[in-house]
Each structure stands twice: as structure tokens, then as C-alpha cells.
Image: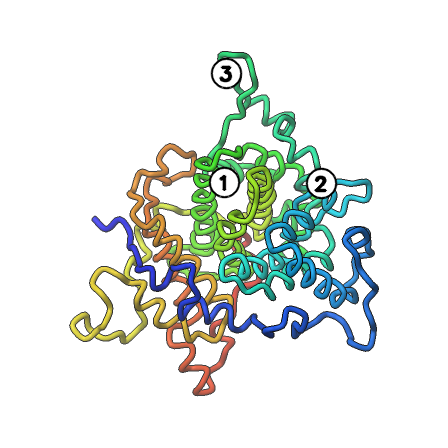
Amino acid sequence: MTRGFIITSRTTSSRPTALARRVTSSKRHSTSMRHTSGQLTNPRNPSPETTGRNILAMKISASFYNAYTNFFSDEIQKNGLRQTLERFIFSHEANWTKDEPRMLDRFIAGLLHPLIHFGHAAEFGVEGMAVEGLAEAAVHKSAYKELYDANYFNLSSSTGSYLSTLTSALNLSGAAKPQHTHSLTILARILADERLEAGKVCTKDSTSKFSDTLKNSGDIIREYASLWKVSEDENEIQERVEELAWLVAVVFGLGGWKKDQKFKADFFLVHLVTSDLFIPSILSLLKPAHKVDLLRAYFPVILGYFVSRGRPAIDVQGFFDSVTVDPKPEHAPSPSESPEPVGNPWYTVMTHTIPHPDEHHVKAERALAHSAALYGARPKGHFAHTELKGAKEIDGTLFVRTGGLLMGALKWNAALKAKSGGNQEEWMWSRDGLGWN
């Protein structure tokens, strides 16, 4: 029985290999940290002077982007990436002083793009990308006030009043011992919660599904998120990192799949996959307490986006019965003619991914391949202890199955089609939502 596929370090190394260079090159705008293309200001409209003291109190405005890029460039050059990130994203001053700058919130806002941009710096050492990510966070408004406040990050008071009565436990010494609930169990409970049905928290035709969802059900999502525990213990942190990799793949892959229908590659949910890839690299820069803060801030955002896309049904059994573990394009060469190493379908997927014209697709396939390299050998039954229906069927092939579905939706040989004048509408992402169909 095939359990999963491990791909070589050639495609999953933290070094900028062909695929990694393809991901970063399109975003690396200049060798200078101060000369970032695509700036958000008109050069003729000067930004105000900034200092470490006033930057967190400045009015949020896209017109200040130049000032922020200059400021964070200087900060990184003087103090380094780690200290700059800790001070301006994770410190108490950056989040919970009187005016509540909420920089961690803003770092994950904007469909996770500040985090994604910064993540390229954390993984590849492209410091200009760190400047972009920090500046983007500074010009974004906070997005998750309904999901967390200062109390949410206080472990002693992080559980909701109702759910905490169901999950709290005491150890023999009488001290409170938070009980962790697996992310797939939390997903199962969200799927069963009538309050979060498609149409109840946001409408199908809404152009602001995510903000509507948080406005109408942010407190519910927060209570579910509070069941997901993580401490400063490094082993526990790594366990939670693995949980996130499985969760985002399930949400995107199974969330967009229905039997006998075309796979819907949801444009919003794919950002959960691409952002998750950078979480370990960013964690490596943080002190233990701030590692916990990042994980706990990121987790409810995953839940919120899943609910906002219509909380699509998750058919685990059908998915693993139907979706191939060996994805290939139509008219692929016979096995005897194919250069693919035996038992490694990622070779074919990556061969078609690297030249693909869609950046989001490239990043998503790379993220799925990386997860396959780490967790591809997990056997069926690994998640049998969770409450998700059919979870016992989930194994390490989840990632290559999802990668194949994405390849089909975004089109094999897309680069060749683009060069020959093919219609890019053929590989457009799905933006309509998932749970209403």
C-alpha cells in the first residue's frame, strides 16, 4: 500500500533552488533595500519622518509606505532581522499599549501577504523582502479584532467561557492544565456547528465575505481557536507546526473537491497553504513566547477563512477513494518513456510547476511538496484519534493528491499554452466561494 511520497531535497531544501528562485525572483525588486518597486506612494508626495518612537503611533496610510521602507531598512541594517521583527511585530509596545497598534494582527492581515513577503527573507535571506513585509504590515489596518485581543494571548484566560467548561482539566497538584484539542477535531466541530452554515455568517454574493464572517461569528471562531493549545516547549511547537500543514492542505484540497465535479482551487484558501510554508522559518527568528503568539494568532485566521468561503463539506473517504496519487497531464509519455523516478510523482508535478506563469500556483505546489517531504510517510490511521469523519483514511498522500488537483485546475503545460496565446481564463482561480454549491 502506498503511504506517501518523499521528494528529494532538490525541491524542498531551504536553499534557493530552481523552484525557490522562481518563487523569489518575481518578488525581488532590487538589490537595494531602499529601492522597492511597486511602492504604494507617489514619489512626489513625501512621507513623514519616522522614528522608532513614533512609527507605531502614526496614522495608518498607504501614502506612508516609502517612509516605512526606509525606516525598516535602516532598522534591519542596524539591529538585524531578528531584533527588528521582535520589536516591531511581537513586543507589547507594538500591540497592546493604549492605542493598540496591533502589529501582529496587521502582519497577518491583507490576506497574509505581509507574512508571506517577510517569510521569503526568513527562509532565503532576501532582506529586501523583510522590508516589504514589515512596511506592508505598517500600512495595513488591523483585521482580526473579533478573533483576539490581549487577553487571548494570556494562556490563563485564553479559553472561552462556554467551551472552557467542556475542556478544562486539573492535574493532581490542583493547578490548571490546558487540554489541547487537535486542529482536525476543531475542524470537525466547526463543520457540525449550525451557527456557521453557509449563508448564516456571510452571503454568497458578498464582496467582503471574510470581514462579514468575523463581524457575525468572530466570537464563535475565537472560542474554537482557544481550544488549540501550544506552550513554549519546542517539541510541542513542532507538533503544532505539523498540525497546521495538514490543516491547510485539508481545508484547501478537500474543501475544493467534490465527487464528479471539477476541483475548485479557491484563491483565498490557497494563501493559507502558501503562508504556512514560511511559518517555520519565521519561528526560527523568535523567542519561545513569541513563537506561541505567532501560532495562536495564525490559527484562528485559518478557521475564519474556511468559514468565510462557505464552510465547504469535507468528504475524506470520497477524496482518498477517488483522487489519484500519481497525477500526470493528459497524453503523458508511457512509463518506459518518462524520465520520472519510479515512485516519485512530484518530479512530474514540479517539472510543470517551475515554468508556470501563475506565481500563486508555483508557491502553493512548493508548499505542498515541502509538506510531502516532511510528512509524506504518515500512514493511514495517523489521525484516527480525531473527530473528523473519515480521518482514519488520511495519510501522507494528501499533499500529492492536492498538488495534482491544483495542477489540473491551473493547467498542465500552462507555460506552453501561454506562449502560444492560450486563454489564461482557463486556469483562473475560483473566487466565488465553496460551500454554497
Depth order, front residue of 272/313: 272
Please, which residue is most extreme toward the front here? 78
Residue 358 seen: yes
| Closer mark to the observer between disc 1 and disc 2 | 2
Residue 262 seen: no
| Closer mark to the observer between disc 1 and disc 3 | 3
Q: Residue at x 67, y 73 (%)?
A: 35
Instruction: Tell me if mark 2 has few (under 14), some (14-19) or many (20+) residues whose alpha carbon lies within 10 angstroms of its own.
Output: some
6 relative position to 127: left or right: left
- For label 3, the residue is 171
* Residue 171 in picture, x, y percent from top left: 50, 16
Q: Say above or below: 182 vs 90.
A: above
* Residue 270 in picture, x, y percent from top left: 51, 58
In the picture, the disc for residue 103 is none
Q: Say above or below: 433 vs 236.
A: below
Please, which residue is most extreme toward the top here? 173
Q: CA distance from mark 2 to mark 3?
A: 31 Å
